[in-house]
């Protein structure tokens, strides 16, 4: 699997810089979705996607619900900036005791991850709890359908396109079966909600079972989350409160300033 890693990342890069004649056109509604899929299939083939990945793309249908949700989430995070107290209370309600229990029950693992990557265990379990309630609700939506719909939509097509390509690669390589590729409506995967592109780039096989499993393996989830933050500049042993370098690194995890503040504030209470 590791021997293919450079090939896979290179294929993602190729897909992003491929010629405009091949590029699938976006739209602000469902019209042209079938044509979009045909064009994207050409891009995917050029990037080395095989039968399983192409079949997953072919099975998608445009989801107006996903697009509607994308619009609503954008508005809700804007409101959170002006009403942080309400946002924080909602995101952390009932989270304190379960988080402390995970810190205790996974103490050995978390200490190993913190020692290797330099990211405090309090940050990791906070992200874990806030994202999915420690894996309790990772999402039920078909990830390829979500990412195809969002890539087809012109508003943020550039952001979602490499993630759609990466999701097809994950399926094609057999890392996750198509039936298991279910997550949040923006295409997030697993217990800390990795986008597919980041799954490929930063996923870690910490339990050494031969695959990076961010859906079922807590060791892989924690190590991958820590690896992501370290790769984006996290400084071991340094504070993470507002105004610090590490606080700014949290922006790479979630672009919402309210979300960044919530992670830092809650982690500091543990």
Image (spheres, rainbow, N blue to C red):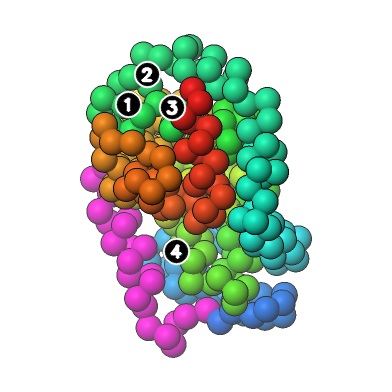
Assign a secondary structure to mark 3: helix
- Asked if residue 51 can be seen in this view, the reply is no
Residue 247, given in percent of the width and then of the height, sits at 39, 46
Residue 152 x, y percent position in the rendering: 60, 73
Up/down of 107 relative to 13, above or below: above
The stretch of residues the image draws in magenta is 1-24
First in sequence, mark 3 or 2: give its number.
Answer: 2
Q: Earlier in the sequence, mark 1 or mark 3?
A: 1
Q: Residues within 10 Å of mark 4 (few under 14, many from 20)?
A: many
**N-terminal-most mark, 4 or 1:** 1
Q: Position of residue 229 (x, y in %)?
A: 35, 43
Tags 4 and 3 touching, CB below 8 Å: no
Residue on which disc 1 sits? 113
Residue in the image at 66% along x and 75% along y: 33
Cα distance, mark 4 to mark 2? 32 Å
Q: Circles 2 and 1: CB distance less than 8 Å?
A: yes
Can you tell which of label 4 and label 1 is closer to the viewer? 1
Question: Secondary structure under badge 1?
Answer: helix
Marks 4 and 3, how far apart in space?
31 Å
Mark 3 vs mark 2: give the one in front: 3
Q: In terms of sequence position, does the residue under pointer 4 or pointer 2 come before the other?
A: 2
143 relative position to 125: left or right: right
Real-space CA distance between mark 4 and mark 1, rounded to the nearest whole angstrom: 28 Å
Q: Which residue is mark 2?
A: 109
How far apart in space, not on screen, are marks 1 and 3 (Cα)?
12 Å
**Mark 4 or 2, which is nearer the eye?**
2
User: Is residue 215 highlighted in magenta?
Assistant: no
State whether residue 161 appears in this view: yes
Residue 93, located in which quarter of the rendered image? top right
Badge 2 element: helix
Residue where numbered disc 4 is placed: 162
Report the Cα–Cα distance between label 3 and label 2: 13 Å
């Amino acid at each position: 699997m590791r021997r293919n890693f450079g090939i896979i990342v290179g294929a993602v890069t190729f897909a992003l810089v491929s010629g405009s004649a091949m590029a699938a056109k976006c739209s602000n509604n469902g019209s042209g979705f079938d044509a979009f899929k045909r064009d994207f299939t050409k891009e995917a083939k050029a990037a080395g996607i095989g039968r399983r990945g192409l079949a997953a793309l072919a099975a998608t249908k445009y989801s107006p619900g996903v697009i509607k949700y994308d619009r609503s989430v954008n508005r809700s995070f804007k409101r959170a900036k002006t009403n942080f107290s309400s946002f924080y209370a909602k995101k952390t309600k009932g989270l304190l005791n379960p988080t402390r229990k995970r810190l205790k029950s996974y103490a050995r693992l978390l200490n190993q991850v913190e020692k290797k990557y330099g990211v405090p265990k309090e940050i990791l379990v906070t992200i874990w709890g806030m994202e999915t309630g420690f894996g309790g609700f990772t999402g039920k939506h078909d990830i390829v359908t979500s990412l195809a719909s969002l890539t087809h939509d012109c508003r943020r097509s550039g952001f979602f396109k490499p993630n759609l390509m990466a999701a097809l690669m994950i399926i094609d390589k057999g890392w996750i079966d198509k039936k298991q590729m279910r997550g949040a409506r923006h295409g997030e995967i697993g217990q800390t909600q990795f986008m597919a592109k980041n799954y490929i780039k930063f996923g870690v096989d910490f339990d050494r079972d031969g695959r990076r499993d961010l859906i079922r393996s807590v060791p892989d989830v924690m190590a991958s989350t820590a690896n992501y933050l370290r790769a984006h500049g996290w400084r071991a042993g340094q504070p993470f409160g507002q105004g610090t370098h590490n606080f700014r690194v949290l922006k790479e995890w979630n672009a919402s300033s309210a979300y960044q503040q919530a992670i830092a504030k809650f982690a500091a209470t543990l």
